[in-house]
Amino acid sequence: MSVPGLFADDDSSAAPSRVRVLLPLPLAGAYDYLVPAGLALAPGEPVRVPLGPRHVDGVVWTGTPDAAVPAGKLKPVTARLGGPPFPAELLAFVDWMADYTLSAPGQVLAMVLRGRGDGTQPRPRIGWAPTGTVPERMTPARARVLEILRDGPPRTAAELAEIAGVGAGVVRGLADQGVLAPVDLDAAPPVPAHDAGSGPAHLNPAQEAAADAIRDAARAPRFEAFLLDGVTGSGKTEVYLEAVAEAMATGRQALVLLPEIALTLALAARIEARFGAAPLQWHSDLPAKERRRVWRAVRGEEGETPAPIVIGARSALFLPFARLGLVVVDEEHDGAYKQDDGIRYHARDMSVVRARAAGVPVVLASATPSLESHANAERGRYTRLRLESRFGSAGMPAVEVVDMRAAPPGRGQWLSPRLAEAVAQTLEAGEQALLFLNRRGYAPLTLCRACGHRMGCPNCAAWLVSHRLGRRLVCHHCGYSAPEPETCPECGAAHKLAPCGPGVERIAEEAAARFPDARLALLSSDHIESAAELNRLLGQIAAHEVDILIGTQLVAKGHHFPGLTLVGVVDADLGLTGGDLRAGERTFQLLDQVAGRAGRADRPGRVILQTYMPEHTVMRALAAGDRDRFVAAEMEARADAGYPPYGRLASLVLSGPDEAGLGTFARDLARTAPRGEGVHALGPAPAPIALLRGRHRIRFLVKARNAGVLHDALVRWLAPVRVPSAIRLAVDIDPQSF
Ligand code: ADP
Ligand code: ZN
């Protein structure tokens, strides 16, 4: 991997009469334009140019315009746009990423320009909340709407109509009577009060050593990749905030990426307490107006100092920083860093690329680093910084494995006697418990007890998930949703459809029945509409206004709940089925992380894993607290199979509405598939979800010795291919499932 040279032959003595301009469109490359007399344009400058009958905003790019084209064939640049030029580092990053992901550079540039906006003011998103006023007439439809709002956050009229299955007029009627009042759903959420440190931390020796290494690379910035490898609660955040302080002291900007919006809010509070000013926040749900504000502040567009700290989701990596000084990727192993549609990229890997292009340090932080990062540390590409124990007096939680084969819970129950007893003890001690199940909804499957029919999605090869909220069956892949039918659509039997297996809603039901006096909170994305709502709940948990927390991965990550001493994993095996080679790694990471929520303050923590596979290497490693042995075993398995991080992988997914046509195209494609020196294509085979949103899917996996071989083989294979218009071909370099 190498970053191309920049501006190598840029001649500043005479303004060029032509420039290359990259447009944020899926075109093959940059286009040449004439520079009107009197306009001096250097690479990175934002310009408006004509394209056919339109005008498009783009960026003056690097590279030499084609002198052979007669000037009469070129159009002149229309105008130079406001604001400073984009830095050379960003241009290099765009080119590199386009090449690596086999996409058009203009598509990557579009991600950079996405926050710029078009100048039109978006209208606020209005939700409805009950005022407490009782309606003049209570119809069943009105009652349903009010019930949904009583149990959940404010929702838009369209959402209410959808969930309650009522017409839009019902919500309007309630609003007219003053029963519902409008709220701005995009209003900035309040900054959480919990877990806010105070001023610069006094670091322990291990933290100090780690911080020193990163500060040194940030001072007179140079590229270096650090793997900040420290157990949950070891104080990794404090360490990288020291590096942020160093970058700021040199007048540079720091970017911190996080996998979840909720974590962004908590970190914002911590940064505000530490630095006395809140950082800018960036994520995909930001209202358009706020996006524009952040985008401009990062560039220092109004001539002011560029914003010093930005924290945000993976797309923050494409912000046009004026003077980037440091990149941090927290929870670097997290799957949320992978973008799975449009241009497929892994924000962790691309962070390293951007930091290298900018010549600044990058910090990848995790308690359970990805195997890729372990391998890079072993090969000396990343500098490993280890924090082996929790900060202060907090110890690691004790992990106990419960063999569910030995003592299965009763029918319709999911908590073993052992776990139920532990919850009771925890409540008695005045402490908090978390019941973790990484599955949304009430039940993963709905089955007819008369004929055995399973309710499936009409658009996908997937079962519909039963949700209590609005009594609906929902597809978690395409969003299809329908009311739970009274009769089986297959055999017509009435009242025979039964939910099978547990989702978090069902665990909440069981917990409520077993512990009627405990205060429960259910945390899953279906029950939490906005970041503000989640934030409010997290604040309540931290303030110990909740006794039992039931949640999906939404609660597994990063949070610090001082009163939480018990974590019960309802189904530790959940991620292990399905045959994906990364399943073990992912499950270990998730369970280690959720276990890490227990006992972070002065009281010791305890973790109970319910499993039907107590002998599985993941369970053994978690019970023994032996991460390194687990990693070594996984590495060996990957090496044997020739899978990443040994060798590289790309996946090619073909999809189309017509199964036969798709199959023919796939077989044709297979004829020219790379099979040779250091590279080998597997497939075609049905993709892991063989039908998605009404499109059939076929997959090739291409294994290669290294990234260069993979890249060249794919280009050679795909360049001559004509894809029929009904078929889509999606290339994913470094896919996360294989
Ligand atoms: P990690 O990111 O490794 O999970 P955190 O940085 O969140 O760990 O630290 C865990 C807890 O310990 C937090 O409450 C944090 O405020 C506290 N902590 C960590 N380092 C220090 C320090 N040097 N001084 C005071 N408190 C610290
Ligand atoms: Zn579906």
Image: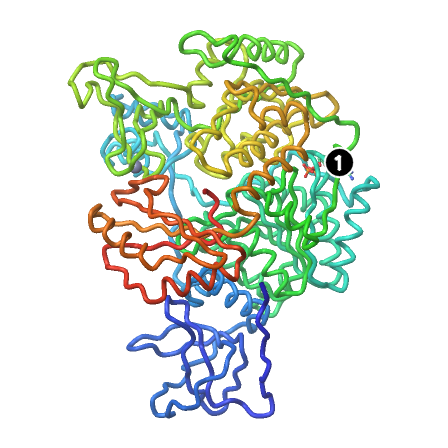
Position of the N terminus by quadrant: bottom right
Q: Tell me which amino acid carries mark 1.
A: Glu
Position of the C terminus by quadrant: top left
> Is 176 placed above or below 551 here?
below
Q: Tell me which image quadrant ligand 2 sits in.
A: top left
User: Furthest residue to the left?
Assistant: 492
> Is 313 placed above or below 452 here?
below
Which residue lies at the image location 59% right of the left edge and 43% below the top edge?
Answer: 370
Q: Position of residue 659 (x, y in %)?
A: 22, 45
Tell whether 674 sits left or right of 659: right
Q: Position of residue 671 (x, y in %)?
A: 31, 57
Toward which corner of the image does residue 23 lie, by quadrant?
bottom left
> Is 474 placed above or below 635 here?
above
Secondary structure, mark 1, is: loop
- Give the class, few, some or many, for how many residues have Cα within 10 Å of label 1's Cα (few <14, many ≥20): few
For this rendering, which residue is in front, 276 or 567? 567
